[in-house]
């Protein structure tokens, strides 16, 4: 599905609008969007996995939590997810 805004229609002439729509439809025909979506999903799975491992390591080794998950796990996992997500997005781009 390709959506067109009124701003695009009022700003561009018919030839320019046709070129923009042709470009966007070529993304659909080539499967670019599906491939990028699947790739980002796979990379995000690794981000969550490694963030959990980093959270456990910091919680157990640095803060010496012996039972359950301490607050350090959640804070570290959140920070690791943000950092790893930025790196993953750079890789996907």
Image (tube, helix red, strand yellow):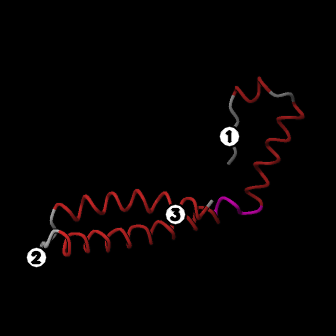
Q: Residue furthest top?
A: 10
First reached walking from the N terminus: tag 2 or tag 3: 2
Instruction: Locate residue 48, reporting x and y percent.
Output: 38, 67
Is 35 left, or right, of 50 in this rendering?
A: right
Query: What's drawn in magenta, residue-wise?
Result: 30-34
Is the residue marked by circle 3 packed among few (<14), some (14-19), or many (20+) residues within 10 Å? some
Q: Residue 64 appears in which quarter of the rendering?
A: bottom left
Residue of label 2 = 66
Residue 80 position within the rendered picture, expressed as x and y whole percent measured from the top left: 36, 62
Secondary structure at badge 2 equals loop
- Label 1: element kind: loop
Q: Earlier in the sequence, mark 2 or mark 1?
A: 1
Task: Report the disc number at residue 3.
Answer: 1
Cα distance in 3D space between marks 2 and 3: 31 Å
Q: Please, is residue 4 above or below residue 50 in the view? A: above
Residue 64 sits above or below residue 2 on the image: below
Q: Which residue is mark 3?
A: 88
Crowdedness of circle 2 by 10 Å Cα count: few (<14), some, many (20+)?
few
Residue 69 highlighted magenta (yes or no)? no
Indicate the secondary structure of the residue bearing disc 3.
helix
Residue at 80% x, 41% y: name it: 20
* Residue name at image x 19 percent, y 74 percent: 60
**As drawn, 86 above or below 50:** above
């Amino acid at each position: 599905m390709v959506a067109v805004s009124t701003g695009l229609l009022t700003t561009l002439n018919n030839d320019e609008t046709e070129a923009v729509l042709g470009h966007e439809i070529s993304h659909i025909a080539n499967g670019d969007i599906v491939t990028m979506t699947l790739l980002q999903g796979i990379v995000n799975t690794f981000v969550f996995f490694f963030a959990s491992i980093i959270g456990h390591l910091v919680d157990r080794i640095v803060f010496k939590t012996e039972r359950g998950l301490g607050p350090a796990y959640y804070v570290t996992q959140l920070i690791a997810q943000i950092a790893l997500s930025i790196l993953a997005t750079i890789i996907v781009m």
